[in-house]
Image (spheres, grey):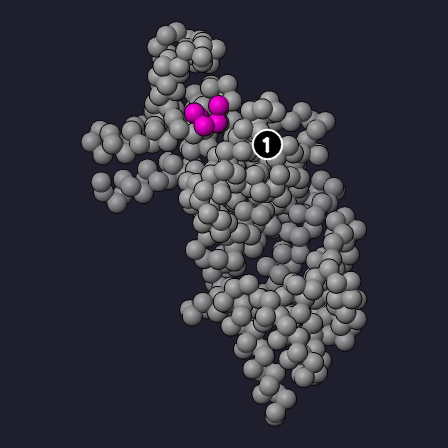
């Protein structure tokens, strides 16, 4: 198989997997295992036949027809599945093949909301979203979240069983339930994005999160928080290539080469953020996107509008209060008004004990102390942060800052 054909089939898989699975879940009466198995079988057939016959003009229709025929064949051999068979063969014993990709209903929105149903815990929601909406294998999903494949397989099995036993409807929630259901979906998508943002080997997770957010905003164009989460992802992703140097070491926002930022992504993110905020229902993702836009649109770091960022964090703290928001606000205050203004805020957060094990609390305190000229105290905080840092890149960065403190103190 040529590299060009392999790449084309991979692209069709990425775009069409969730659409085919969603259709098959509906056609099989909610049998997730059968739906995914038949979708996978359809792609296996494509890999076997397309190198000789060529990619069909309507590849999604071809694949969905193959998946449906496989399901019919499976169900015919199971006498207990008579109701499913009647549903699948409602158009006749041998249904006509789908003629056009446009004949396939796009039920990915139903799939997203079902994966994120409140009857499932967060781990199950994330795992099911990855498996059903991105087409990642159980092994790939397990590696992405650092758990054994068997554990992930059990998690997926239990999630699907719970959906079946609880008779979770395969649908978009009615309008009156949407406000309480949508935040869970957005939270799961942003978790996926972040899981791939900090690790180049998991970048696919971020790409899939952005793709799914696009599906969501296309289906719900007037939901400002859906627009906000997509804007936030795009604005962060625009800086991806500049966050580390050639050696894989972290580069701070102030030191990043802004000529490497993706200006098209920034422009799209800013436009989405402005569109969301025009609804005048500012939620946490919209406000975070507005903060990211302040950073992304500053020509150089010195031009960053830190007072505006402090104001946005004030608003965010009212809408979605959390100790992490307080810490980020303290960083902004330190940039707007100087480190001495921010240190009491960070010390107050530290006194709560809620972030004792969070390396960025200690790294933030260390940086403020360093900027205030208190290098010995800064070094102590850098050591704590170094012990807690979760990645090699962060540890190398903090080690460099700690060494710099030693040089300043000796000098």
Vertical placement of 87 versus 298: above or below? above
Which residue is rendered at x = 38% and y = 26% of the image? 38
How many marks the image carries: the answer is 1
Q: Position of residue 371 (x, y in %)?
A: 68, 79
Q: Main secondary structure of the magenta part?
A: helix
**Residue 315 in the image, given as x and y percentages of width and height:** 77, 53
Magenta run includes residue 33: yes
Decide: is 317 above or below 52.
below
- Helix, strand or loop at disc 1? helix
From the viewer's perspective, is 387 left or right of 86? right
Q: Residue at x 28, y 34 (%)?
A: 47
Q: Is residue 410 magenta?
A: no
Residue 159 shows in the view? yes
Residue in front for this viewpoint, 228 or 348: 348
Query: Outermost residue toward the top?
Result: 92
For the point 74% across and 54% down, the residue is 322
Q: Residue at x 43, y 29 (%)?
A: 36
Residue positioned most to the bottom: 411
Q: Measured from the top left, where is residue 295 in percent x and y? A: 62, 61
User: In the picture, which quadrant includes the C terminus?
Assistant: bottom right
Q: Is residue 33 above or below residue 398?
A: above
Disc 1 marks which residue? Answer: 113
Few, some or many C-alpha atoms within 10 Å of disc 1 (few <14, some 14-19, many ≥20)? many
Q: Quadrant of the N terminus?
A: top left
Which residue sits furthest left?
A: 52
Residue range of the region highlighted in magenta in the rendering: 31-35
Q: Position of residue 321 (x, y in %)?
A: 76, 52
Would you say residue 98 is visible in this rendering? no
Horizontal placement of 391 versus 180: left or right? left
């Amino acid at each position: 198989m040529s590299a060009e054909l392999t790449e084309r089939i991979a692209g069709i898989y990425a775009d069409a997997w969730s659409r085919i699975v969603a259709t098959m879940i509906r056609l099989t009466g909610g049998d997730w295992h059968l739906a995914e198995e038949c979708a996978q079988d359809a792609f296996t057939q494509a890999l076997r036949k397309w190198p000789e016959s060529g990619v069909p003009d309507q590849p999604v229709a071809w694949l969905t027809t193959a998946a449906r025929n496989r399901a019919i064949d499976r169900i015919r051999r199971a006498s207990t599945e008579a109701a499913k068979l009647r549903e699948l063969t409602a158009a006749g014993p041998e249904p006509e093949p789908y003629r056009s990709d446009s004949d396939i209903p796009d039920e990915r929105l139903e799939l997203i909301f079902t994966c994120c149903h409140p009857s499932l815990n967060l781990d199950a929601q994330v795992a099911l979203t990855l498996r059903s909406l991105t087409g990642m294998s159980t092994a790939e999903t397990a590696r992405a979240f650092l758990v054994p494949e068997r554990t992930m397989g059990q998690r997926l099995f239990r999630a699907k069983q719970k959906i079946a036993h609880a008779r979770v409807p395969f649908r978009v929630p009615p309008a009156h339930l949407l406000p309480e259901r949508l935040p869970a979906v957005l939270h799961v998508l942003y978790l996926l994005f972040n899981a791939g943002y900090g690790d180049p080997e998991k970048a696919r997770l971020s790409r899939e999160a952005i793709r799914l957010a696009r599906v969501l905003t296309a289906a719900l164009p007037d939901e400002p928080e859906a627009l906000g989460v997509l804007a936030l992802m795009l604005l962060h992703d625009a800086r991806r290539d500049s966050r580390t140097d050639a050696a894989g070491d972290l580069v701070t926002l102030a030191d990043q080469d802004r000529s490497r930022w993706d200006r098209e992504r920034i422009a799209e993110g800013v436009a989405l953020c402005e569109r969301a905020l025009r609804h005048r229902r500012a939620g946490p993702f919209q406000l975070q996107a507005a903060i990211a836009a302040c950073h992304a649109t500053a020509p150089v770091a010195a031009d960053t509008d830190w007072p505006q960022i402090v104001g946005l964090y004030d608003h965010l703290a009212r809408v979605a209060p959390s100790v992490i928001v307080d810490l980020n606000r303290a960083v902004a205050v330190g940039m707007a008004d100087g480190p001495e203004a921010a240190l009491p805020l960070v010390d107050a957060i530290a006194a709560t004990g809620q972030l004792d094990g969070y390396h960025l609390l200690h790294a933030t305190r260390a940086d403020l102390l360093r900027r205030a000229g208190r290098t010995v105290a800064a070094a102590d905080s850098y050591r704590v942060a170094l012990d807690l840092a979760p990645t090699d890149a962060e540890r190398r960065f903090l080690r460099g800052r700690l060494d710099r403190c030693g040089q300043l103190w000796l000098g």
